[in-house]
């Protein structure tokens, strides 16, 4: 039985990925900043451990507690939407600390065991916003685009050890609390110089059209993990797939 460790399992995609792999008889280590009881089905194959990906000591403890794993999913992430002009450096740093450096630090922490065993898969969850330019999300997009670049180079570095590094790019998923969790980082959207742009962007979000569901992301992670021939960058969700196809033309 294989073991998967997933970051950010307290809600949204992480919670669904954990559920999806548990249902398919994997051992799941669901990590959460603040472990919550009862949000995943009780199972002898489930372990919930604390992990803050921005905290070095927390990462060291999680690696010790986890022991050998076969798959690492770097899913934890935070959102931000603001004009660059009104974004604080502190908020930008928080976003990069979690989305970019958190992913890199976790990867680095688990790499030695993957390299030594000559097997393992690292799946980094970024975003379809990296496939299409949008205003007001430049910092968030930059934090995820950096992970795309990191992962694609890392994949080449790890090929020689039989270890894979891959990307899953979800589209917009209004069913997760992602936007609500990022509300405090949305500063300056009411600035008069950006009001029109903000109105148009949010209107486009509220239009009916294809979206991404947590199940799409769990399925994409499943495919990435179990199908070594799958593309290194896998869009997840109907909107993300459409964006990926348009970005090829
Ligand atoms: N929803 C979307 O529209 C969308 C689209 C594309 C990509 N994504 C990406 O998909 C991933 C999951 O998002 P989601 O939609 O599932 O949002 P979510 O429900 O807000 O989940 C984010 C998870 O990350 C965790 N987290 C935040 N900071 C952390 C830290 N420092 N250490 C460890 N865990 C931390 C949160 O834990 P707490 O409960 O402790 O805050 C939560 O479990 C993110 O990387 C996000 O950028 C989301």
Image (spheres, rainbow, N blue to C red):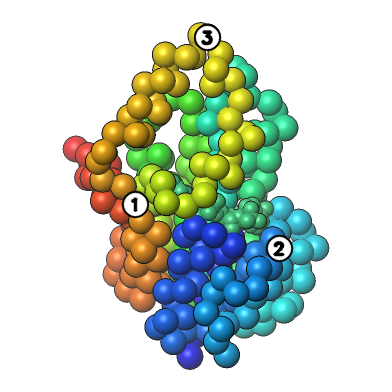
Side of 45 where 173 appears, left or right: left
The image position of residue 200, as x and y in percent, is 36, 21
Q: Residue at x 26, y 38 (%)?
A: 208
Residue 197 in the image: x percent, y percent?
42, 17
Of the numbered discs in the image, which one, if any, rests on residue 212? 1
Distance from disc 3 to disc 1, alpha carbons, whole Å, reads 31 Å
Q: Disc 1 to disc 2, how far (Cα)?
A: 26 Å
* SS type, badge 3: helix
- Mark 1 or mark 2: which comes first in sequence? 2
Numbered label attached to residue 21: none
Is 180 on the left or on the right of 23, as rendered? right
Q: Earlier in the sequence, mark 3 or mark 1?
A: 3
Residue underneath mark 2: 34
Q: Is mark 2 within 8 Å of ligand 1?
A: yes
Number of residues whose C-alpha sits closer than 10 Å to that of mark 2, classed few (under 14), some (14–19) or many (20 or more): some
Cβ at disc 1 under 8 Å from ligand 1: yes
Q: Position of residue 170 (x, y in %)?
A: 39, 51
> Of the residues under marks 2 and 3, which one precedes in the sequence?
2
Q: Position of residue 185 (x, y in %)?
A: 62, 34
Tell me the crowding category of disc 1: few under 14, some 14 to 19, or many 20 or more residues within 10 angstroms, Cα based. many
Most distant residue in the front direction = 38
Describe the element under mark 2 as helix, strand or loop: loop
Residue 89 appears in the rendering: yes
């Amino acid at each position: 039985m294989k073991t998967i460790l997933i970051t950010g399992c307290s809600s949204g995609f992480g919670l669904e990925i954990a559920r999806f792999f548990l249902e398919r008889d994997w051992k799941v280590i669901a990590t959460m900043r603040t472990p919550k009881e009862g949000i995943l089905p009780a199972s002898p194959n489930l372990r919930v451990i604390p992990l803050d990906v921005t905290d070095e000591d927390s990462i060291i403890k999680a690696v010790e507690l986890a022991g050998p794993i076969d798959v690492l999913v770097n899913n934890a992430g935070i959102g931000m939407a603001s004009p660059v002009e009104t974004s604080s450096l502190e908020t930008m740093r928080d976003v990069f600390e979690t989305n970019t450096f958190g992913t890199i630090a976790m990867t680095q922490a688990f790499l030695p065991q993957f390299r030594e065993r000559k097997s393992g898969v690292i799946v980094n969850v970024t975003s379809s916003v990296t496939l299409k330019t949008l205003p007001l999300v430049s910092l968030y997009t930059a934090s995820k685009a950096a992970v795309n670049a990191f992962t694609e180079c890392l994949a080449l570095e790890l090929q020689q050890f039989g270890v894979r590094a891959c990307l899953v790019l979800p589209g917009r998923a209004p069913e997760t609390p992602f936007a609500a969790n990022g509300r405090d980082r949305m500063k300056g959207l009411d600035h008069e110089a950006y009001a029109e742009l903000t109105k148009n962007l949010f209107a486009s979000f509220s239009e009916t059209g294809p979206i991404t569901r947590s199940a799409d992301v769990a399925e994409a992670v499943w495919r990435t993990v179990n199908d070594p021939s799958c593309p290194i960058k896998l869009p997840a969700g109907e909107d993300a797939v459409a964006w990926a196809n348009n970005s090829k033309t």
